[in-house]
Image (cartoon, rainbow, N blue to C red):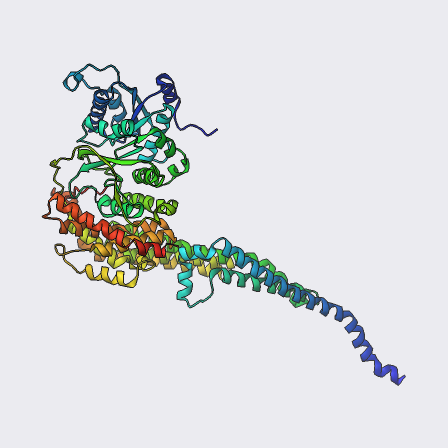
Amino acid sequence: MPRSILNKEVREKVKEYKKADIVVGIPSYNNARTIPHVVRAVSAGLVKYFSKYNFVLINSDGGSKDGTPNLVKETAVEDFDTILIEHPIHLINKIVTPYHGIPGKGSAFRTIFEIAHLLEAKACAVVDSDLRSITPEWMESLIEPILFHGFDFVAPLYQRHKYDGTITNSIVYPLTRALYGKRIRQPIGGEFGFSGEMLSHFLKNKKVYQTDVARYGIDIWMTTTSVAGGFKVCQSFLGAKIHNPKDPGADLSSMLSQVVGSVFNLMETHYDSWSGVTDSTPVPEFGFKFEVATDPVRVNLEGMVESFKYGVSDLVSVWDRFLSGDVLSELNRISSYNVLEFRLPAELWVRIVYDFSLAFHKNIMTREHILRSLTPLYLGRTASFVNETMESSPPEVEEKIENLCQEFEKQKGYLLSRWK
Amino acid sequence: MNLILSSNPFVQFWEELKVLGPKVLVFLIIVVLGFILAWILKVAIREILKGVRFDTLCYRIGLSTALARANVRRTPSEIIGLILYWVVIFLFLLVSLSTLNVGAVDQMAASFLVYLPRFLIAVLVLIFGYLLAGFVGRAILIALVNAQVKSAKPISVAVHVLILILFLAMGIEQLGIAKGVVIATFSILLGGVVLALAIAFGLGGKDMAKDFLEKKVKSTGEPKKKPDDISHI
């Protein structure tokens, strides 16, 4: 029998609670500033919308030094009367535990999954601990489609600043949409709802938790696994997403390599699921969409363009193993642009992403080197996106992203023709 | 009497031939067997390496590209098969020559057999050094470019070359060629490079170091980088 990753204290708590209809997990690492608000919003949401159900809130912590776990234990909604018409029937049951394994969000999620599985949860939700805009309604949006509409996986849909989530907008969303044919706008959003059946599926292959899935790769792994596994998927509008910056210690190159590496790895696993897909379709949506203001984002455009130029001048010896001569000469030409006229066209960007995925698939060199050498090109594309959308309104920005998605779908034949 | 005298060298020759003949026959048999075994081993190792995708691995670590640059048309698995082929033939030749009981050949065979493991270790050290230098050089290059370090390329090339020199010295030392000279040359070379770099940085970067220290000590409070709140994920 495999050794449990849960400690004795947690197992005793599980014995005490026996079962839970709903489990909500919050992974954390040094989030003392924001986690009390997240815990309050989740608790209020559960009591307000699911008072007839048993629920447990789990905090899976990565060894915070700022007292995050204690704050989770101590935080309570002082006055439910202000948000509820009826008084609550339930107390908030909590399990606060450190997680084991590779340090990262994925390992924290795995602990939450294991506990939820033991509690035989019918519906689960996970929310990030750095959120500043979460409201009790998020619980309803993430859990209701599971409990009352028979969905297995709920992806979030938010109003975000145009420069927030640029890895999502320039790579993950367009690529996963072109591959698997489902228009899930925030595949690595961080907040998800899922059924008990989906939960069991997430725990089937424990080896994945030894890969980048244990880190930032978890979100795309969950989304792709549910889509490729043929589960019923929908997305729910949550409002604005405003959050503190992700782990300030983590550098961009590692983050990008973990996320993109997970997408590329999943392409290998689910080749049969994506190779036959030729176009994309929308997924059912829940929630009432509305316009909300988001925090302004300062962008260091010069820094991004400079990084791109460094890459073009020094990394050609790495890229020429898998990027064709015409792509390299085009990059060379672009690197002569000044900051404000800097553009990396969508067609070229899509070709680069597909060539990187092919190099990764064919093991042209150490995979970590392939992934990390993408950073300057990604920053170039981000700088180009900032320049293209500097004066654009949110709908215009969405249109730009839609055009990029269509380009990914258009060039999918190129990827397929070189895959085997 | 005359007949006896004239037939004596022939008899002697015949007697010697009777002794040497079987030895030559054994020599030839061993050589032929060696060729057959070497050929079988060459084909077997080539197929096994192809089966375990050795060529793909070599392509991945850049060995195939290096071979192509050196105008070598054979695949790495073919090259290893060929090396094994000639090593086996050479070994069989030495063994077969020892059947002839020629003193000099016996001595040469003995010293070669003693030397062979050292030679193979030296080859392995060189191959490992080449691969490690390529891997570390590239990793440093990518990391420095991502950190926007201006001299990323020269630094990575320097690290690459230093690792190559280190492993080359280790390989030559393993072969036992001019041990003292190799170590002394390597020490002088490395020491010289470090000293040259120190002097170059010291002289060339004097003003830069001054500026840097002044900024650190004075701490003007001016932010080093432009603010960037962009959240990539």
- Measured as percent of width and height from the top left, residue A32 is found at 22, 28
Left or right for B177, reference A273: right
Residue depicted at 68% across the width and 65% down the height: B30
Kindly tell me whether residue B130 is visible in this rendering: yes
User: Which residue sits at x=47%, y=58%?
Assistant: B171
The image shows residue A30, relative to residue A250, as above or below, that is: above
Q: Residue furthest bottom?
A: B2
Query: Which residue is nearer to you in this view: B4 or B138?
Result: B138
**In the foreground, B121 or A248:** A248
Res B13 → quadrant: bottom right
Residue A127 locus on image (x, y percent): 25, 31
Task: Return the residue nearer the eye: A230 or A101.
Answer: A230
Q: Nearer the viewer, residue A205 or B217?
A: A205
Residue A143 x/y as whole percent: 26, 28
Taking the image as shown, residue B194 lies to the left or right of residue A71, namely right
Quarter of the image with the C terminus of chain A is bottom left
Give how far across and how far down residue A271 sits, in percent: 37, 47
Give the number of marks. 0
Outermost residue toward the left? A391
**From the viewer's perspective, is residue A305 above or below residue A195?**
below
Q: Quadrant of residue A161?
A: top left
**Is A84 placed left or right of A370 in the picture?**
left
Is residue B148 in view?
Answer: no
